[in-house]
Amino acid sequence: MLALESLSCGHGAITAVHGLSLAVEAGRIAALVGPNGAGKSSTLMCIAGHVRATAGRVVMDGSPLDHLPPHERVRRGIAIAPEGRRLFKTLSVEDNLRVGGMIHPAREFARDRDRVLALFPRLRERIASLAGTLSGGEQQMLAIGRALMARPRLLLIDELSLGLMPKVIDACYEALGRLRDEGLAILLVEQNTERVMSVADTITVLESGETVWRGTADAARRDPSLLDAYLGTAAGPAAEEPPPPR
Ligand SMILES: Nc1ncnc2c1ncn2[C@@H]1O[C@H](COP(=O)(O)OP(=O)(O)OP(=O)(O)O)[C@@H](O)[C@H]1O
Ligand SMILES: [Mg+2]
């Protein structure tokens, strides 16, 4: 569904991502991991049309998106739950969902809203609350819910579990699994390597904008050097070895 072909993008003179290639298919979860500043958010923002590609292409359903603005990409089926969530904090939960669904007729709002509330029942209890008063977990659910209101076929999620409690992370991952099973294509940026390994079909590791590893999650699990070097906490026993003496 989505293909990045030798994609480079950046911010002014800074190249954030260089020559990245990856694909995401319907009903699959692709993960993008790597240290701070690796270029993960820049990649998602480039796919969503907020950051301009400087080389290579973003291809959706076989057509390059080239210079399509963000709202046209939403119409092509791409929605993002961005880093920092960027909710409308002084609007209610319901109105945040309304904004997400604005590309569809107003009379279809209730049906789409109810689908999101079925996925995240906690939001139902907070439907009239201002988004700024929600817990971190509820805000993340709302950010994903708002993206789903556009009825995307490709969902981009940046830092799904960052700062959230384990129970909330469980709820978010359960929802992700359901969306995947319904046929959504998901590109996930995640720091929590244990979670990534358990849910992703493919993994791409970025470091300073360069692709340092790509393959299936199974292959990643079998590659101790990769786990050691880039995915730290998922490395198991090796990560628990004491530091070398000075
Ligand atoms: N708006 C911006 N203006 C200028 N440079 C930026 C901007 N956003 C990101 N960068 C730079 O682009 C590079 C990649 O940043 P990016 O935010 O994509 O990384 P990341 O992998 O998402 O990091 P993190 O894990 O910290 O979220 C970094 O060098 C960063 O300083
Ligand atoms: Mg980021």
Image: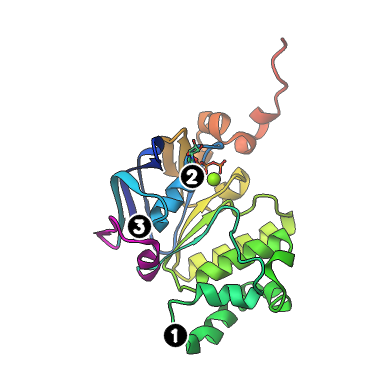
* Quarter of the figure with the C terminus: top right
Place of residue 202 in the rendered image (x, y in percent of width and height, measured from the top left): 45, 48
Relative height, residue 178 to residue 208 (above, below): below
Q: Which residue is mark 2?
A: 40
Mark 2 or mark 1, earlier in chain? 2
Q: Quadrant of ligand 2?
A: top right
Asked which secondary structure carries label 1, the reply is: loop
Q: Amino acid at mark 3?
A: Leu
Residue lying at 64% horizontally and 37% vertically, measured from the top left: 233
65 part of magenta stretch: yes
Is residue 158 found left or right of 9 in the rendered image?
right
Is residue 31 found left or right of 138 in the rendered image?
left
Is residue 181 found left or right of 135 in the rendered image?
left
- CA–CA distance in space, label 1 to label 3: 26 Å
Residue lying at 45% horizontally and 66% vertically, measured from the top left: 184
In the image, the residue with mark 2 has its CB under 8 Å from the nearest atom of ligand 1 = yes
Foreground disc of the pair 2, 3: 2
Which stretch is magenta?
61-75
Please identify the quarter of the rendering in which residue 11 is found.
Answer: top left
Q: Which residue is mark 1?
A: 105
Foreground disc of the pair 1, 3: 1
Residue lying at 29% horizontally and 49% vertically, measured from the top left: 57
Q: Which residue is mark 3?
A: 2
Q: Are marks 2 and 1 in contact (CB under 8 Å)?
A: no
Place of residue 2 in the rendered image (x, y in percent of width and height, measured from the top left): 35, 57
